Image (cartoon, helix red, strand yellow):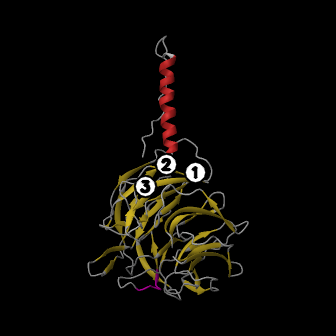
Amino acid sequence: MKKVVTPIALVKTGDSIEPMGQRWKCHHRLAVSLALALAAGTAVPGLAQSSGTWANTGNLNTARVNHTATLLNNGEVLAAGGHDPAGTFASAERYSPATGKWTVTGSMATVRTFQTATLLPSGQVLVAGGLIGISDTGVISCTGSAELYNPATGQWTATGSMTTPRFEHTAMLLPNGLVLVAGGLNSSGTALASAELYDPSSGTWKATGSMNNARAGAQATLLQNGQVLLAGGAGFANTAELYANGHWTLTSSMVFSHPSTRASLLPNGDALVFGGNLASYVSEFFNPVTGLWTATHNIAVNPPNGPLTLLLTGKVLLAAGESSYGTDGIARLYDSSSNSWLLTGSLNHARASHTATRLANGQVLAAGGEFKNSDRTFTILSSAELYTP
């Protein structure tokens, strides 16, 4: 990434001022630096980007994939865990939108990938479960442990462990302040139907009602009525159910089968679900009032399966991902008012299994992930970039 030179104030000293030629040289150096940064797609703090475009920002200190990214109350983003071909990480780092840089922070006590991270009302971040390793014989190891990150100190502390070790599960902060964790896979690679609740006041977990169907790789959505929608996932890919008051209730089946899902609450209260498999990714939305699913207008042939992010504009950003063609850099927007998908600016780096986090200023930070090489190996990415709606 090209070095960005920040403006240097020109000052008057005594009764003398800089010669005009010297002042021109200073401004010229700044202009050239900004031009180089923009040509490279580099985000310059304080400089506006064009709407619908991506610009590179500071790289992660550690290239990572399948990590978590959490927006902290101070506007920074915490990235934790993940893995690369050499192993699984305990490390964490923070992104500052003000500087465009990542800073290493305290490491977790346990390495983990495919975990969940939830911002608590206290401002701390709860990280729970995750895959901790795969042996040479293919034996999977996952954990039920959980940790709390304190942004003020930059340190992690252990909290109560889940009743069931799991990874590729989902987590959702409920209106009552408890955290619901549901589904996922166990160390045998079997999908789970169990669910449990974390109480931040006591630091303990307790089992709650199990789902009607075991599922993994599904993302939960908190609806405006306080219910939690969990749809699709490995196991029962066309089914959906609602959680409320310790019980799960099946709702109508989806139009399509979604072995893995991304989900986002729409401004009108409906829930957008996107997913499928490499052969076909499709989308539909759930109306909580009618309990019915409706397919969206056709997104495209072989769209990528990247994360969904609700923008301040009310549109939903689909930021690249994996498709049958390989790793994609294409991004799209879903507009619920017209029930249509539209192309928007492509990422500078094609990536999959990355994170996409909406910042306080409305921009979206895409970080890390992986790129499939022509020989079918993967390159783990440290790059990050910002999308301006």
Q: Using the numbered discs, state the Cα–Cα distance from disc 2 to disc 3 in whole angstroms.
A: 15 Å
Residue 383 image label:
3
User: In the image, is residue 253 above or below residue 222?
Assistant: below
Callout 2: SS: loop
Report if residue 32 lies within the magenta region. no
Q: Are marks 2 and 1 in contact (CB under 8 Å)?
A: yes
- Above/below status of 339 relative to 17: below
Quick check: 202 left or right of 289?
A: left
Question: Residue at the spot x=55%, y=85% of the render?
Answer: 247
Q: In the rendered structure, which segment of residues is drawn in magenta? A: 190-195
C-alpha gap between disc 2 and disc 1 = 9 Å
The residue labelled by disc 2 is 97
Rate crowding at label 1 as few (under 14), some (14 to 19) or many (20 or more) other CA atoms within 10 Å.
few
Return the residue at label 1.
361
The outermost residue toward the bottom is 212
Spot occupied by residue 116 in the image (x, y as percentages of width and height):
44, 70
